Image: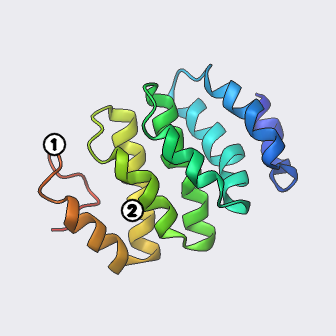
Amino acid sequence: MAVHLLSPLERLLEAAHWPVFKGWMRGVRNRDHCDSLACELLGAIVARDRTFVRVLRHWAIASNPWFRRAAAMAVWKRVGQMGDVDAALSVCEPLMRDRHPAVVEAVDRVLAGCLASDAPTTEEFLERWKRRLPFPKPSYTLP
C-alpha cells in the first residue's frame, strides 16, 4: 500500500530515500510487490541519478532473488525514458545465467526494452551471450 501511495510523488524521491526502500525490499515475497517497489520508487531514483546503477550491479549478484529481480526492474525506467541501454546491459550482465524464473522474466523484459531503444547495441550484447546461456533461448534472443 505504501508503494502505491508514494508512486504519484516519484518526482520528489531522492537518494536519501534509497535506504528506506532497500529496507522494504527485505520484505518482498512476490513479483508484483517487487516490481512495484523497483519500478515505481527505486526506478524513479535511478532514472534521475545514474550513480545508482552501480548499486544495482551489486544487487544483481545478491543471494536474494527479489533483489536480483529488482536490480533489473529498477533500471527499466531509465531505458524507457532516456534510452540508457548501456546502464541496463551492465545490470543484466551478471543476471544472464540466473535460473530463478522471476529473475529470468525481469531480464527478458528489460532486454526487450533495450531492443526497442537501441537494437544494434542490444543485439551485439545478445550475440555475445547466445552460446553461453544455460537455458533455452528466451523471447528476447536473436533468431
| Residue at image coords 18%, 52% | 137
Q: Residue furthest bottom?
A: 120
Residue 126, position in %: x, y?
Answer: 26, 64
Crowding at mark 2 (Cα within 10 Å: few <14, some 14-19, many 20+)? some
Crowding at mark 1 (Cα within 10 Å: few <14, some 14-19, many 20+)? few
The colour mode here is: rainbow
Residue 59, position in %: x, y?
Answer: 51, 38
Classify residue 59 as left or right of residue 45: left
Residue picked out by circle 2:
112
Q: Nearer the viewer, residue 111 or 46?
A: 46
Q: Amino acid at mark 2?
A: Ala
Residue picked out by circle 1:
134
111 versus 55 height, above or below: below
For the N terminus, the quadrant is: top right
Rendered image quadrant of residue 77 = bottom right
Residue 3, position in %: x, y?
Answer: 74, 35
Q: Nearer the viewer, residue 126 or 34?
A: 126
For the C terminus, the quadrant is: bottom left
Q: Amino acid at mark 1?
A: Pro
Instruction: Report helix, strand or loop for mark 1.
Output: loop
Classify residue 46 as left or right of residue 34: right
Mark number for residue 87? none
| Residue at image coords 61%, 21% | 26
Instruction: Report helix, strand or loop for mark 2.
Output: helix
11 versus 81 height, above or below: above
Please tell me whether mark 2 or mark 1 is closer to you in this view: 1
